[in-house]
Amino acid sequence: MRTGKFIIGILLLCCFIRMVIGEPCTVPSGSMEPTLLCGDRLWINKLAYGGRFPSRWLNVFTWIGPLRLADEENHWEYRRLPGYSEPKQGDIAVFNSPADPQLLLVKRITRGVKKGEPLRIDRRTLLLYRSLILRDGGKVMEKDGKIYIDGKSSSQYIPKQRFYYMEGDNRMNSHDSRSFGFISEEAIIGKFDFVLFSIDSQKQWWKAIRLRRMMMRFP
């Protein structure tokens, strides 16, 4: 009986750490070189921006693919704990890919749009802000030289939440906001603080560990 309670306690503690404090992730590509290298194992700091309550509770308790897929239809309202900082320009953030929420992306914030900040919308800026409007729940179209937002001709849009423009440091080899546009605050998981350890898969196993990058911190 005690053993069962102990195991349950450990599982709940692990879930709490993963949801509120942080979790590790792996850099799979060179889109953030030279800052981050392919094979870096990062620590996602969730305390910085505030731990995000899970939209699918089963996904917190399992890493089993079929169970996670079965949980996809569940979606609870977005909520987040208070953090000790807000995402800002220059931060390296980890977020869910707009194309595949199961895929984590690591990019640098190069621009932020505040909630309630009026955005000028014209034919020149529409390409930049179209994704923001759509992800904010709005509808936008261009007809006869005019721009219609939610069915009304408009020259500005006021976001209902915060949005961020994310770019890779390796601009020549990075799939980022230049392709998928602004991402919402809801998509951000946490801030990258340091490299736990790093492995170079191109080298033999006894030379693969990049010792100089172990526990390397970033501002």
Image (tube, grey):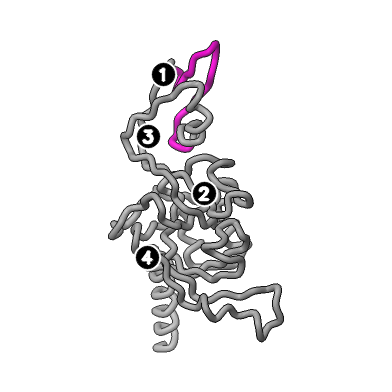
Query: Can you tell which quarter of the image residue 158 is in?
Result: top left
Q: Which residue is mark 4?
A: 20
* Mark 2 surroundings within 10 Å by alpha-carbon count, few (fewer than 14), some (14 through 19), many (20 or more): many
Identify which residue is drawn at 49% across, 67% down.
Answer: 61
Secondary structure at numbered mark 3 = loop
Residue stretch in magenta: 135-151
Q: Residue at x 42, y 50 (%)?
A: 76
**Furthest-bottom residue in this view:** 2
Q: CA distance from mark 1 to mark 3?
A: 14 Å
- What's the residue type where badge 3 is placed? Pro
Marker disc for residue 154: 1
Nearest-to-viewer mark from 4 and 1: 1
Question: Distance from label 1 to label 2 (Cα)?
Answer: 29 Å
Look at the picture and state if 201 lies above or below 153: below
Disc 2 or 3, which lies upstream in sequence?
Answer: 3
Left or right: where does residue 83 sit relative to residue 148? left
From the viewer's perspective, is residue 100 above or below residue 68?
above
Describe the element under mark 2 as helix, strand or loop: strand
Q: Amino acid at mark 1?
A: Ser
Q: Which residue is mark 3?
A: 159
Q: Which residue is mark 2?
A: 167
Closer-to-camera residue (8/198): 198
**Foreground of the two, 19 or 191:** 191
Which quadrant would the N terminus be assigned to in this image? Answer: bottom left
